[in-house]
Amino acid sequence: MSRVECPLEQETLAMVQSGRWPHGCDEASRAHIEACNLCGDVVRVAVLVSNDYQATLRTARVPNSGLIWWRMQRRTRQEAARTASRMITIVQAIAVAAGVAVAIGIITATSRAFSFAPSDLSQTIVAQWGIPLLITLAAWLALAPVAVYLAVGKD
Ligand SMILES: [Zn+2]
């Protein structure tokens, strides 16, 4: 098996890539490339690749800077909206959990008042304030997400 190597192969490739082939190279390089099979092949392939690269550069459509700026601004706004939406969902979940805990506490307290201390005073207090407390709690649960939305929406 014969070794196919040429010490000038990389130099020949660099010459084609830099655009010095065929008009910008010296006579010695030109004579070597015509005589050397490997460098001749390198030149033929590298010229094709270089021509294709140059054609791609000429036909590439690069969007203008205004369009890129607008897309970047739109993406930034969408990411900010996504982050705010995530935060609103977390706050709503916390508010609902807190409301449920308070409701359970109120129900437990009122049921204890009915079952363990059936005095007239506690029954009167629960009868007078139990329903308004539950209505207030329900209103708070309904309005808390709106308040959180308004508070976060001002940013
Ligand atoms: Zn060669």
Image (cartoon, rainbow, N blue to C red):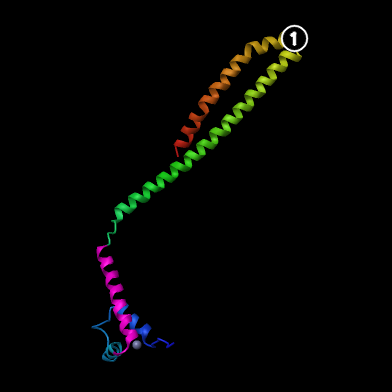
The residue where tag 1 is placed is 119
Label 1 is placed on what type of residue? Ser
Q: Is residue 99 visible?
A: yes
Q: Is residue 142 left or right of residue 100?
A: left
Residue 134's x, y, as percent?
A: 59, 18
Please identify the quarter of the rendering in which residue 130 is found: top right
Residue 63 image offset from top left, x and y in percent: 29, 56
**Which residue is at a point 70% across and 17% down the rendered structure image?**
111
Let me know if residue 153 is in the magenta part. no
From this viewpoint, which residue is outermost toward the right? 116
Query: Who's the residue at 28% across and 70% down the image?
Result: 52
Q: Farthest residue to the front: give it.
A: 1
Chief SS of the magenta region: helix
Residue depicted at 52% across the width and 25% down the height: 142
Say which quadrant the N terminus sits in.
bottom left
Along the line of sight, the residue nearer the viewer: 45 or 65: 45
- Residue displayed at 50% across by 36% down: 88
Magenta stretch, residue numbers: 35-59
Which SS class for mark 1? loop
